[in-house]
């Protein structure tokens, strides 16, 4: 069996597309990751209205006035995800 290295970027880009691109480059060139993984959520479906509108449990780490706004801030659009996929492919890495 051959092991695969997965770089889990998730939402560590903090909602910054340029930072996500830099993270891809580092994962591809410095870490030699085989797969570069992001996350995509539909926060309106994932969270109840109540949970969406609650304050973030650690307000100083929040990117919005509610937990839902915070989660939305961290989400890239489908168009942005398609660009990230192309960047991964440029480095011959699997986008996931």
Image (tube, rainbow, N blue to C red):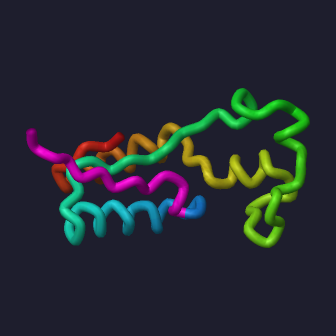
Q: Main secondary structure of the magenta part?
A: loop
Judge left or right: residue 39 versus residue 94.
Answer: right
Task: In the rendered view, tell whether residue 18 sits above or below residue 5.
Answer: below
Percent from the top left, x then y, of residue 12? 52, 61
Query: 80 above or below 59?
Result: above
The question of residue 55 being in magenta is answered with no
80 left or right of 30?
A: right
Q: Is residue 52 left or right of residue 38?
A: right
Residue 9 image point, x, y percent = 43, 56
The one nearer the camera, 3 or 29, is 3
Q: Inspect this view and state whether residue 11 appears.
A: yes
Q: Which image quarter is the C terminus in? A: top left
What residue sits 83% from the left and 66% below the top? Answer: 59
Residue 60, horizontal then vertical, whole percent: 79, 72
The residue segment tinted magenta is 1-13
Q: Residue at x 54, y 39 (%)?
A: 40
Percent coordinates x, y for residue 34 in the rendering:
21, 50
């Amino acid at each position: 069996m051959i092991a695969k290295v997965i770089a889990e970027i998730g939402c560590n880009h903090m909602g910054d597309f340029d930072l996500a691109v830099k993270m891809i480059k580092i994962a591809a060139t410095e870490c030699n990751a085989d797969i570069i993984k992001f996350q995509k959520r539909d926060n309106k479906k994932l969270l109840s209205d109540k949970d969406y509108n609650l304050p973030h449990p650690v307000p100083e780490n929040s990117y919005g006035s509610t937990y839902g706004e915070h989660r939305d801030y961290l989400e890239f659009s489908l168009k942005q995800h398609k660009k990230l996929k192309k960047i991964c492919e440029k480095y011959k890495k699997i986008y996931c």
